[in-house]
Amino acid sequence: MSTRQRIVQVAVPAPLRKTFDYLLPENTGSGVQPGLRVRVPFGRRELVGVVMGQTDRSDIDASRLKRISSVIDPQPVLPEMLMRLLQWISSYYHHPVGEVMQTALPVLLRRGHAAAAVGEEKWALTDAGKELDLSTLTRAPLQKRMIETLRARDSALGSHDLAEISKGWRNAIRQLEEKGWVASRYEDCLTAPDTSLLAAPEMTPAQATAVASVSKDIESFAAYLLYGITGSGKTEVYFQLVQQVLAAGRQALVLVPEIGLTPQLVDRFRQRFAVPIAVLHSGLSDNERLCAWVSARDGRAGIVLGTRSAVFSPFANLGLIIVDEEHDGSFKQQDGLRYHARDVAVMRASREDVPIILGSATPALETLRLAKEGKYSLLELPERAQSASLPEVKLLDMQHLKNNDGLSRPLVQAIRERIEKKEQSLLFLNRRGFSPVMMCYDCGWIAPCQRCDARMTLHKRSGRLRCHHCGAERPMPQTCPECESENIHPIGEGTERVEQALEALFPEARIMRIDRDTTRRKGELEEKLERVRQGEVDILVGTQMLAKGHDFPNITLVGILNADQGIYGSDFRAPEIMLQRIIQVSGRAGRADRHGEVLIQTWHPGHPVFKALKTHDYNSFAEQELQQRKAANYPPYCHFALMRAEATAAGEALHFLQRAQTVGRAMAPEGVELLSAVASPMERRAGRYRAQLLVQSNERKPLHGFLDRWLDTIEQEKQSKRVRWSLDVDPMDMY
C-alpha cells in the first residue's frame, strides 16, 4: 500500500532472505544513506542492521511499521561499491542479505561500536611491578602467574595472551592495575614502516615477462593466473606489481589461505615497502581487526594482507588484488555464508576495475581451465629462482619395505644422512594424534565416537581418545569394553606416534612436531617456524600446516608418509587435492642452493598421481583429470549446488530433503537436475543425523533462477522449521 512517509529498507542479521521495512526516526530530515548502521527493534530484541535503501511503498501498513531506534553512523561504514558486491554475494550464494552484511563487518561494528581505529589495549609491568617480590602474592596465584608471564615475555600482552593464562584474566589484570603494578596502553594495529628496506633482486626473464604483462593494463580489470612451480619467485612478481600500485597512490589487497602464512609474508612485505600494512585474520582480537579494517577504509594502510574474510575490507583507493595459493580449500567458507574468497575476489576486481593475480604452483582445475580457454591470462614461471633446482622425487614401494611406526628403512637412512650433514628433514603426515584407532586384538572392537559415525584417535601423551570431527574425548581404556580383554593396541600412525618413533631412532636429534595440538597458543606456530628457520630443529614432523608457502632454506629432505590417503576418497576432487598438497609440501625441499630430495612412501607407486609427482608434471595430471571431469560432467564442466540438512532424530533430515527433492523436480527447468537425496557419507556427526541433496546444471543462469524459486517454496514448508538446513553453491567438499 502507499504511504506518505519515507520507508527505510534494513538488512538485519536474521536467517530470512529479505530486508525489513522501518520508518525513519523522529526528526530525521530527508532520510538515511545506504551503508549506514542503525539500531532497530526486531521482535523482542534490538539489532544492529545496515540500511540498504529507501522507498515510498511497503507491503505492510504504515501503522504497523516500527521506527528505527537510532542511526549509529554519521557516514556509511560500507562504501557503495562494496555494498553492491555484498548484494551480489547474497544473490549468488542465496544467503540472507542481513547475514552477508554481518559477515563483512568486524565483530565490534556488528555490536554497534564506533567505526574508529582505537587499536589494541595491552598491559605491561610498571617499574613497581618489575621490582615486586612475588612471595607477597601467595594468596593471589592468578595475579602472580600474570606478573611471571609479563616478566618472561618482557613485552606488553594483549587480551589473547592473557586469556591463555586464565579465562578470568580481566578481574586479575584490573586488580594489578589498581595496585600500580601493571599499566595499560593502546597500540596502533599498524606498525611503523621499516626504515631499512631490502633492495629488489634481479628478476628472472620469466618474472620480468609476467610483470610486464600485467603492467601494461594495471589500471583496468584483467584476471591473471600466475602459474609458477614451487620456489619460482611468485612473491617477487607480487612485490613488483604492488610497488607500481603504491607509486600511483593506490592500495593492494593480498589474500593468503592460512593464518600460518601471514607472519612470514608480512615480514617480507615490511622489508620491501615503506608503507603501513594492515593484517586481517581470525587470530586477532576484536580491537585489532577493527583497527585494521578502518585503516584500510581510510587509506592509512597501503597494503592489506589477510585470510579469506579480508576480501570484504573497504578501501579508499583499491588498485590491485592478489590471491596467493589460489587453489587452497581454505578460501572456501564451510559454514554460515559459504562463499569462496577467490571467486568473490575476482568479482570484486571486475566491479572495481582493477587487475587480480591468482598465484599457485598447483592451480585449481577450475582456474586452469579458465586460463586455457583465454578467460584468464596465463603467466608461467617454469623454473626455480636463483638457479635452485627442483628436488629429486623417489617413490618407496611399501609393498616391499618393512616399516617401523610408519618409517621405512630408506627414509630413516636418508634422515640420518641429513643429520650428519647438519641439514634438516621434514616429515609430512596429514593425521595428527598417536594412532588413528584403538583395536582389541581378541574381538576386533575399534574405539568409536559416541556422537559420530567415526573412530576416535588416540593421543598418547595425554592418554585420551579424541574425535577429530566433533571434538569429543574420553580416557584411553585399559581393557576392551566388549570382551574385557587387555589385548588392545593402537593401529596406524599419527604425527604423535611418528614423533615418538623418531625420538627412539635419533635420541640426539632436535625434533619438533607442528600440528593443531602443538600450536594452540597464540603466536606458538610463528615461534616454532622461526626456530626451524634459525636451524634449531633437525627433524620437523607435521600436518598440512607445513605444506603452504613456508621458506625453510636448510630443509633438503621431505618425507611423505601414508601418501595414499586421499587417492580413493569419496569426493571426486580427492586426487587433485592430494596431489596439490604433496607438491606443496615437497616444494619445501632444496629451496636455496642445496639439492633437495623427496621420498614418498606409497602402496600404489603406479598410480597417475605419483607418476606426476615423480616427473614434476602437474600439467599432464591436470589435463587427464579435466578430461575425466568432462566425461563425467563434473565441475568445472557443470555447476553444483548442495543442500545439506541435519536433525537430532534419525531419518528426519533425509525425509526433509526427499520432500525438497519432490518439490524441486516438479519446478526444475530443462537442464537443471536434482539427484536423489541420500544420507551423508558420515551420517551421524556430533550427535546429529545428516543428509544431502545435489542439484546440477550445465548453465549458471537457469540454475540460479531455479534455486531462487525452489528456496522460496521450501521455506514455506513446515518441516523446514524442524531441521537445520543450508545451501552450498559451488561446494568444494561433497563429504
Image (spheres, rainbow, N blue to C red):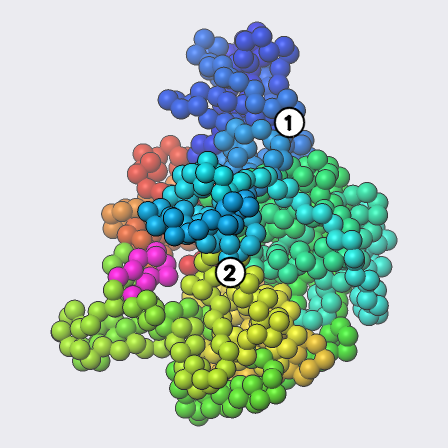
Q: Which class describes the residues within 10 Å of circle 2: few (<14), some (14-19), or many (20+)?
A: few
Q: How far across and how far down the image is residue 611, in percent?
A: 58, 81
Question: Which residue has dot 1 on it?
Answer: 76
Q: Is residue 443 left or right of residue 142?
A: left
Q: Residue 197 magenta-drawn?
A: no
Q: How far across and how far down the image is residue 392, in percent?
A: 63, 84
Question: Which residue has dot 2 on it?
Answer: 524
Local SS, label 1: loop
Local SS, label 2: helix
Image position of 332 with respect to 526: above or below: above
Task: Look at the image and give the residue range highlighted in magenta.
Answer: 464-474
Q: Nearer the viewer, residue 428 or 354?
A: 428
> Could one spot residue 89 in this view of the protein?
no
Quarter assignment of residue 495: bottom left
Work out how far the residue at label 2 is from the one at label 1, CA to CA, in angstroms. Answer: 38 Å
Q: How far across and how far down the image is residue 86, in percent?
A: 60, 37
Residue depicted at x 85% and y 59%: 212
Q: Residue furthest bottom?
A: 400
The quarter of the picture where the C terminus appears is bottom left
Which is more N-terminal, label 1 or label 2?
1
Residue depicted at x 71% and y 43%: 301
Amino acid marked by disc 1: Pro
Q: Nearer the viewer, residue 586 or 284?
A: 284
Image position of 37 with respect to 706: above or below: above
